[in-house]
Structures are given as structure tokens and as C-alpha cells.
Amino acid sequence: MARPLDLIVEEMLDYIEQARSYTQDMTFDQYSSDTKTQRAVERCIEVISEASRHVPEEIKGKYSMIPWSDVAAIGNIFRHEYHNVAARIVWDTVRMHLPQLQAVAHAIEAELPRDDEPA
């Protein structure tokens, strides 16, 4: 059974916020020497990646500025090529790409019917 879009978007937003908050007051050098934070952020990105796979194609088409296939693919890299995951790539993802994905997720969320509105 497909998960409701509101739950998918909520999950994405939650994990984006977590990943960004974990690195908020860090420099890249601090991040690259902090294995716990690296693993926590990588896990957040894995969950974001998996959730993105469940966003309907028509929504992805509407927000085509997001490279949805890349978002999905990064999770596979973390799961299967974990030994090749560079701290710089993860850092750049959090700093440069997650803010845009977060903005789009908020836009999708704003378009969803609320519980007190008819569908």
C-alpha cells in the first residue's frame, strides 16, 4: 500500500532539518573529523533518498528543478558503495542541495489538502 504523500513529505522535511542541524555550526574540517556526525548525516540522506522514491511522478515533473533521480541514487551509493562516500560530497549535499529540496518539500506540503479541508 502506498504511503500518503503528506507523510512522505513530512519525513523528508524532518530528515533534511536533522541533517542540516547536525552540521549547522561546523566547518568542513570539523565535520570531516567527526565520524559520528558523518554517519548521522549519511543516514539522514539515505532516508531522504528513499522517501523521494515515493514522491509521485506528476509532483516530480512539477518540480523538475530537483534532480529526483540523483536524490534517489545517492541513497544507493550510501548503501552499496559506502566505502567510496567522500565527506566532501556529503558536506556539499547538505550545504548546497538540501536547502533547495527543503524549499520544494515545503511547497509540496503547502499544496496538500489539510485535514480540515475537503480533498
Image: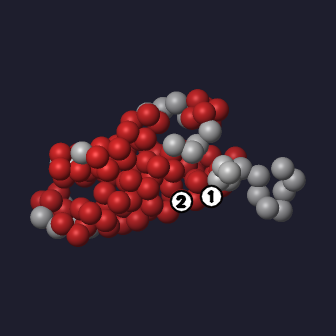
Q: Quadrant of residue 37?
A: bottom left
| Res 108 seen here | yes
Q: Are marks 1 and 2 in contact (CB under 8 Å)?
A: yes
> In front here: 44 or 103?
44
Percent position (x, y) of residue 56? 62, 39
Other residues around mark 2 within 10 Å, as few (<14) / some (14–19) / many (≥20): some
Left or right, 54 with reference to 90: right
- The residue tagged with tag 2: helix, strand or loop? helix
Left or right, 93 with reference to 33: right
- When the figure is inspected, residue 81 is found, relative to residue 39, above or below; the finding is above
Q: Which residue is mark 1?
A: 7
Other residues around mark 1 within 10 Å, as few (<14) / some (14–19) / many (≥20): few
Residue at 51%, 50% in the rendered image: 51
Left or right, 75 with reference to 55: left
Badge number at residue 11: 2
Percent position (x, y) of residue 10? 58, 59
Percent position (x, y) of residue 94? 33, 52
Residue at 40%, 49% in the rendered image: 98
- The residue tagged with tag 1: helix, strand or loop? helix
- When the figure is inspected, residue 59 is found, relative to residue 47, above or below; the finding is above
In this picture the colour scheme is: secondary structure
| Res 24 seen here | no
**Amino acid type of the residue tagged 1 in the rendering:** Leu
